[in-house]
Image: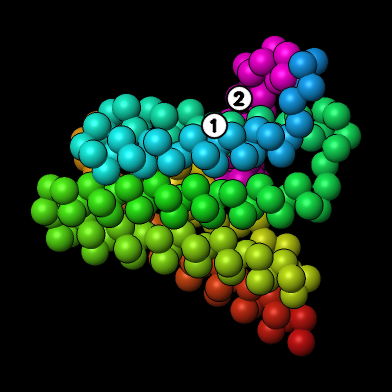
Amino acid sequence: MQKTPSTRDYRTKLRDLFVRITDPIIRLLILIGIKPWMVTIIGMFMVIPAAFLIATERLIAGGVLFLFASGLDLFDGTIARKTNSASKRGALLDSTADRISESILLGGVFLYGLSVENEQILIFSFVAVIGSILVSYIRARAEGLGIKMDEGWFTRPERVVLMGLSCIFNLVLMGVILLSILTIATALQRWKLADSKLEIGE
């Protein structure tokens, strides 16, 4: 019986394709001495002007900049692997920067909701922050308990693409509604999976 490709398989293929396309850029960054942590920090700080653009109703520019900044997240890990400089400290910095970036972006969306006086955007952007944090927290907590947790319907790559495109195509409300629903669903999925693995372990 043929095995149905998993969400993780699709993500791995897309990541590998991205790495092949951007390999010349990565090699150049390594050649000029760029370190993985530098890319992580640059990407995180680039989200600030992206959030500002969104908050001030310049959605297309903000969405494009956010997608570019978030795309750098793939560079730091690749540089670390190619230069044999991957470390637990780097992984911690990367995860922390990801959470900060998402919170900043959704903060910009919240301010945009205030600017256009849309209460639904305010509510769902707040829920989306909670959902996004829960998805990452449950994985971190599960792995802290010795449970491998790669599964997840809607993880960071999907969240980044959804919010970036929602801004570019001026579908912010639809974006935060979908983000809220899908992140909460993914958090529940991961919690249930972790709980079942703990029960088997006991």
Residue 142 in sight from this viewpoint = yes
Front residue (pair 120, 174): 120
Q: Residue 34 at x, y = what percent?
A: 74, 25
Are the two marked residues, 1 and 2, in contact with CB atoms closer than 8 angstroms? yes
What is the magenta segment's predominant secondary structure?
helix
Residue 71 — which label? Answer: 1
User: Does residue 59 appear to the left or right of 95 in the view shown?
Assistant: left
Front residue (pair 4, 91): 91
Q: Residue at x 32, y 48 (%)?
A: 108
In this rendering, is residue 121 above or below 45?
below
Report helix, strand or loop for mark 2.
helix
Quarter the C terminus occupies: bottom right
Q: Residue 57 at x, y = what percent?
A: 21, 37
The stretch of residues the image draws in magenta is 1-29
Q: Residue 146 at x, y = what percent?
A: 78, 71
Three-letter code, disc 2: Phe
For label 2, the crowd category at 10 Å Cα-Cα, with few meaning under 14, some 14 to 19 and many 20 or more, is some
Residue 56 — which label? Answer: none
Q: Residue at x 71, y 39 (%)?
A: 37
Q: Residue at x 65, y 33 (%)?
A: 39
